[in-house]
Image (tube, helix red, strand yellow):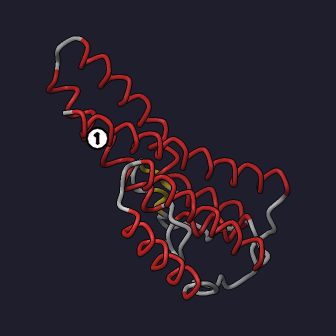
């Protein structure tokens, strides 16, 4: 397994996943590693802006915008997206998976509201994502043999990683929106 920021885990040869935690961990790696770069790029942009280097500040703002938006889209709690992959590994019950998927959906809609998106667009987007999430439930590649169960500690680690990654990228998206709108 090779992990690449912004892309995630790339499996090259070797054995297939052995446990549900490995699936969740791999799914989080692209957005997770990028979550370390986003605050750093935000700090560089702020320092560059204060020192009059608008070219560096602009490049860092563009990087944060691309990284945050790309990774937030990948964290959507839908089917084969990484957010959906992590949730399926962390929550094995249908009710728990459905509730957490919709909690994440409302978090995304709240982020859109805070960023200033029109209410009508948020309602339509929420409805489309809800329908897609419900229609792709249960679909996916089934492994040839059962994966090892996820332990309580691994469940908390994967769920916490998903929440932290979402928060970092959401903060980056809101920060970028503020910077772009103030130009």
Label 1 neighbourhood size at 10 Å, few (<14), some (14-19), many (20+)?
some
Q: Is residue 118 above or below residue 111?
A: below
Position of the C terminus, as image quadrant, is: top left
Q: Residue furthest right?
A: 152
2 and 55: which is toward the camera = 55
Q: Residue at x 64, y 48 (%)?
A: 161
Q: Is residue 18 above or below residue 68?
A: below
Q: Residue furthest top?
A: 51
Q: Residue at x 59, y 69 (%)?
A: 85
Q: Report x, y in % for residue 115.
A: 39, 48
Left or right of 79, for residue 88: right
Q: Residue furthest front?
A: 119
Q: Residue at x 20, y 32 (%)?
A: 58
Q: Report x, y in % for residue 174.
A: 40, 42
Q: Residue at x 49, y 58 (%)?
A: 9
Disc 1, SS: helix
Q: Report x, y in % for residue 20.
A: 71, 66
State the image quarter where residue 37 is shown.
Answer: top left
98 and 75: which is toward the camera = 98
Q: How many numbered discs?
A: 1
Q: Report x, y in % for residue 135.
A: 55, 88
Dot 1 corresponds to which residue?
63
């Amino acid at each position: 397994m090779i992990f690449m920021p912004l892309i995630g885990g790339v499996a090259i040869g070797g054995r297939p996943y052995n446990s549900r935690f490995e699936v969740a961990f791999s799914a989080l790696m692209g957005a997770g590693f990028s979550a370390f770069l986003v605050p750093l790029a935000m700090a560089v942009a702020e320092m560059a802006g204060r020192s009059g280097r608008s070219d560096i500040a602009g490049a860092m703002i563009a990087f944060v915008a691309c990284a945050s938006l790309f990774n937030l889209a990948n964290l959507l709690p839908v089917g084969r997206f990484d957010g959906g992959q992590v949730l399926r590994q962390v929550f094995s019950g249908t009710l728990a998976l459905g509730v957490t998927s919709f909690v994440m959906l409302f978090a995304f809609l709240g982020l859109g509201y805070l960023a200033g998106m029109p209410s009508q667009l948020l309602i339509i987007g929420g409805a489309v994502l809800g329908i897609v999430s419900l229609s792709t439930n249960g679909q996916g590649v089934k492994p040839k043999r059962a994966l090892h169960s996820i332990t309580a500690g691994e469940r908390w680690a994967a769920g916490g990683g998903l929440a932290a990654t979402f928060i970092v990228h959401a903060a980056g998206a809101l920060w970028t929106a503020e910077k772009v709108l103030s130009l």
